Amino acid sequence: MGPSLCSTPSARTSSAGEAEEEEAATLGVDGRSEGGAGAAGRRTAESVRGAERVLEALSVLDGEEERAAEYEAALARHAAAPPDEDRPRPTLVPNLLLLGLTPGAYLLRAL
């Protein structure tokens, strides 16, 4: 006599448990209550720190954009003014916060 499919209560329980685990995996939910809550809290704290880094980088880049616009305006004023040997040409001092990176590379580094 061959084994019958799902005839015993333990076989039905294990298949129901497997179905629940499969559904939880599909939804991205962990069935363990203790480990799942701790991991979610840690990920949230990491997400907050990451968001703060990105916002700080965006703030630095916004300031850098303003500095570049001021520099361009100073260059235009310098070019429009009559020639004067005593007046130096405006220079844009590199922003040390950017670490020599382009704005896009700096933002990606913050991610």
Image (tube, rainbow, N blue to C red):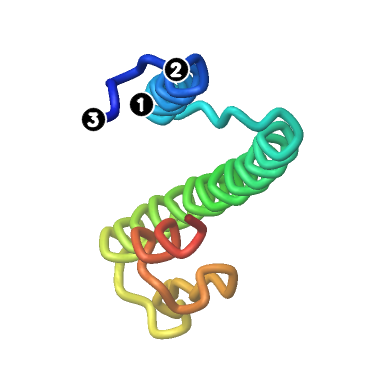
The numbered dot on residue 53 is: none
Mark 1 closeness class: few <14, some 14–19, many ≥20 residues within 10 Å: few
Q: Of residues 87 and 68, which is closer to you in this image? A: 68
Read off the residue under disc 2: 8
Q: Nearer the viewer, residue 101 or 86?
A: 101
Question: Where's residue 61, x and y in %?
Answer: 48, 52
- Residue drawn 44% across the image and 17% down it: 8
Q: Residue at x 59, y 28 (%)?
A: 31
Q: Earlier in the sequence, mark 2 or mark 1?
A: 2
Q: Can you identify the residue that label 3 sits on?
A: 2
* Disc 3 from disc 2: Cα separation: 14 Å
User: Number of numbered discs present?
Assistant: 3
The reply to whether discs 3 and 2 touch (Cβ–Cβ < 8 Å) is: no
For this rendering, which residue is in front, 99 or 26?
26
Identify the residue under disc 1: 26
For the residues carrying marks 3 and 2, which lies nearer the camera in this image? 3
